[in-house]
């Protein structure tokens, strides 16, 4: 099972490029509190590929419901990013009127916080315009043809 952390960004990006995530349907998402893991199970019906993603040592998970017509389960992209600028900009834009609730999150992901230097940032976008933001230390992928 391929495993990646921040030191392996190049390999991770290459793996994601060939992962068949585009058009995969998210079947389940679960969070294991004791192990601090987020698990996503998806299936791509075009290529008959099962994807099991396990994000470890979670710092943040944020889901934003899409407002476009379309399927919320269908992924149009799974991206790994080296910085948190996309997430920072989103949080700053939705901050108005919610300063107390978002201040901690914004401060955590801005600048060069020591505990965030080794973190990975993932963005999953769906057909409906929805987004799932995940910040973690490590990720495991299992990909199998059915």
Image (cartoon, grey):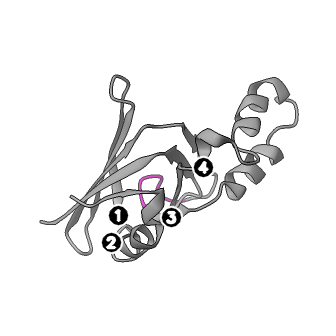
Query: Is residue 144 magenta-colored?
Result: no
| Residue located at (82% from left, 29% from top) | 98
User: Rounded to the nearest whole Å, what is the CA distance between mark 2 and mark 3?
Assistant: 12 Å
Q: Is residue 75 visible?
A: no
Between circles 3 and 1, the one closer to the viewer is: 3
Evaluate if marks 2 and 4 touch, with contact meaning CB atoms under 8 Å apart.
no
User: Rounded to the nearest whole Å, what is the CA distance between mark 3 and mark 1?
Assistant: 14 Å
- The N terminus sits in image quarter: bottom left
**Residue located beneath label 1 in the image:** 24
Evaluate if marks 2 and 1 touch, with contact meaning CB atoms under 8 Å apart.
yes
Question: Which contiguous range is marked in magenta?
Answer: 70-75
User: Rounded to the nearest whole Å, what is the CA distance between mark 1 and mark 4?
Assistant: 30 Å
| Residue 135 screen position, x and y as percent | 53, 45
| Residue located at (74% from left, 49% from top) | 88
**Residue located beneath label 4 in the image:** 117
Residue found at the very far right of the displayed protein:
96
State the mark number for residue 79: 3
């Amino acid at each position: 099972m391929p495993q990646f952390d921040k030191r392996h960004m190049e390999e991770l990006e290459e793996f994601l490029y060939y992962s068949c995530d585009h058009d995969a349907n998210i079947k389940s998402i679960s969070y294991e509190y004791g192990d601090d893991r987020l698990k996503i199970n998806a299936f791509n019906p075009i290529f008959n590929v099962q994807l099991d993603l396990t994000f470890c040592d979670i710092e943040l998970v944020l889901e934003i419901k899409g407002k476009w017509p379309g399927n919320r389960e269908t992924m149009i992209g799974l991206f790994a990013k080296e910085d948190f600028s996309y997430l920072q900009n989103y949080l700053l834009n939705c901050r108005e009127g919610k300063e107390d609730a978002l201040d901690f999150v914004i401060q955590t992901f801005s600048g060069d916080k020591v505990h965030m230097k080794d973190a990975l940032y993932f963005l999953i976008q769906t057909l409906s315009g929805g987004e799932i933001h995940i910040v973690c230390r490590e990720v495991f992928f299992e990909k199998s043809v059915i």
